[in-house]
Amino acid sequence: MIPLTLAQIAQVTGGQLHGDPAAVVSGEVVIDSRRAGPRGLFAAVAGERADGHDFASAAVAAGAVAVLATRPVPVPSVLVADVPAALAALAAFVLDSLPALAIAGITGSSGKTTTKDLAAQLVESLGPTIAPAGSFNNEFGHPLTVLRADSSTRYLVLELSARGPGHIAYLCGIAPPRYGVVLNVGHAHAGEFGGLDQVARAKGELVEALPAEGVAILNADDPRVLAMAGRTAARVVTFGMAPRAPLSSPVPQPTIQAADVRLDELGRPSFTLLTPEGPAPVTLGLHGAHIVPDALAAAALARELGLGLAGIADGLSAAVPRSRWRMEVHRRGDGVTVINDAYNANPESVRAALTALRHLAQDGRAFAILGHMAELGAISQDRHEDVGEFAARADLAGLIAVGSEAEPLLAGARRVRSWTGEALAVPDGAAALDALANQLKPGDVVLVKASRAAHLEGVAEALARWDDPPAPPSRQHEEADR
Ligand SMILES: Nc1ncnc2c1ncn2[C@@H]1O[C@H](COP(=O)(O)OP(=O)(O)O)[C@@H](O)[C@H]1O
Ligand SMILES: [Mg+2]
């Protein structure tokens, strides 16, 4: 963070200072006391399992200069009424002192983190870039990411999430973007919004926040996203799949396109990137055809920031996954393949993963261990049934629904009369492992996916290691150290 005295922090946040006004914070602002470090600031938050205030002393012992808190703590502190609001005020203050920074925001129902990670890897080749780790995209993670910027930072690549109307507008208020990317409008959290049109309203707050000299980067293949062109003062740039056949009537083409998408045996896409500067070949190291629009969005953003065609194409081809549990493909020594896509799940991303699963399995056996898709509200039962039907149409050898909320998946699968695969309901991940792990044969492919709350990544990790003999103690020790 840019150096701020406790007096400044108290003033910016409207907080009450308990400590040395001249003490300077120049390290990282964190909400996890275990990550508190020298010269940093620890923001105490009351979470579901723990209250950060209980770790105030530990954070200061680890080097934090002070604690941002809502009640008195026995160490130097700035007492505020509301910690997220205080972080937001600090972030806005820091950005005011960094006017040369280019701020890009990425939103959408699926693929924000993937796109953010791809875009960051491209933009880093232009200059010092800050992008959040993982999904730091809410009222806590967003300001914490912004606060990492200092006078050396040139680019901020941010992920913006919404669980209701006004959320994205709020995040844009903290860090006003000049570049706004909208990927898609899908069912993630749709229950909380009330429907897809409401999701579109909320996601579009990003492009509404852009200034006239800004750029809105929109997915031309998603009509609800493309329609956001009418809600922004900014210049509009689009991305999408190149039309397969010559068009009979002249339709505006996306600015950035992918043509000739092919997948290798592990589902990694190759395509021709079509840009106003010409074509270039791209081969992604990430898995699934659904990643292609994310790559196009990242390309469009990097191009607007000044990266040339070769830099974009080579950068995309060199990009690696940075966030865990999204379409991690692990091929075991015995020929079984495990897809760990357990970070989260919504109807669109489960379909995308099932499509990738089918591709990887080729003519072999495909299995899916699926937990429920959270926060779908009144449409939850229907959407689970639809996804189950989709899974059966993908001709899975087995569909295992984990937890009672996931059971409608099986009802949907059974709607497909011609489906000969096995449908199984299990109470938890351990039972899913029991049911499947010892049945797997070389050539089989297993997808593991669910909403975050289900924590199925452990199931995927156990499956990925199933063929390994138990490691001797020394090796285990080495692995623990890495
Ligand atoms: N464009 C897309 N369409 C559908 N699913 C996608 C897309 N991009 C990524 N996904 C899938 O969505 C899930 C979440 O990906 P992630 O990048 O973490 O998105 P988010 O940050 O929006 O939650 C993963 O299963 C991923 O494979
Ligand atoms: Mg995310």
Image: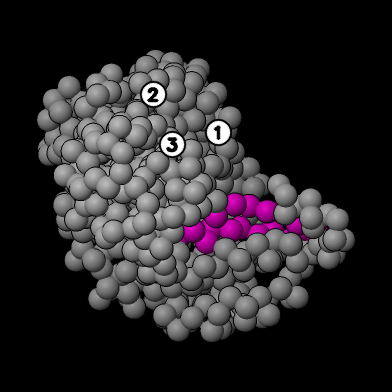
Query: Majority secondary structure of the magenta segment?
Result: loop
Residue that label 3 marks: 39
Queried whether the magenta region covers residue 359, the answer comes back as no
Residue at 55 percent across and 23 percent down: it is: 314
Residue at 21 percent across and 58 percent down: it is: 164
- Quarter holding the N terminus is top left
Looking at the image, tell me whether mark 3 or mark 2 is earlier in sequence order: 3
Looking at the image, tell me whether mark 3 or mark 1 is earlier in sequence order: 3
Tag 2: residue type? Thr
Q: Which mark is residue 153?
A: 2
Mark 2 burial class by Cα count in 10 Å: few <14, some 14-19, many 20+: some
Q: Position of residue 303 (x, y in %)?
A: 37, 22
Residue at 62 percent across and 72 percent down: it is: 397
The mark closer to the camera, 2 or 1, is 2
Please provide the residue range marked out in magenta.
325-345
Looking at the image, tell me whether mark 2 or mark 1 is earlier in sequence order: 2
Q: Position of residue 335 (x, y in %)?
A: 77, 58
Secondary structure state at the residue bearing disc 3:
loop
Is residue 210 visible in the rendered structure shown here?
yes
Tag 3: residue type? Arg
Mark 3 burial class by Cα count in 10 Å: few <14, some 14-19, many 20+: many
Q: Which mark is residue 319?
A: 1
Q: CA distance from mark 3 to mark 2?
A: 19 Å
The answer to whether the residues at label 3 and label 2 have Cβ atoms under 8 Å apart is no
The mark closer to the camera, 3 or 2, is 3
Queried whether the magenta region covers residue 329, the answer comes back as yes
Tell me: residue 105, above or below residue 455. Answer: above
Tag 1: residue type? Ala
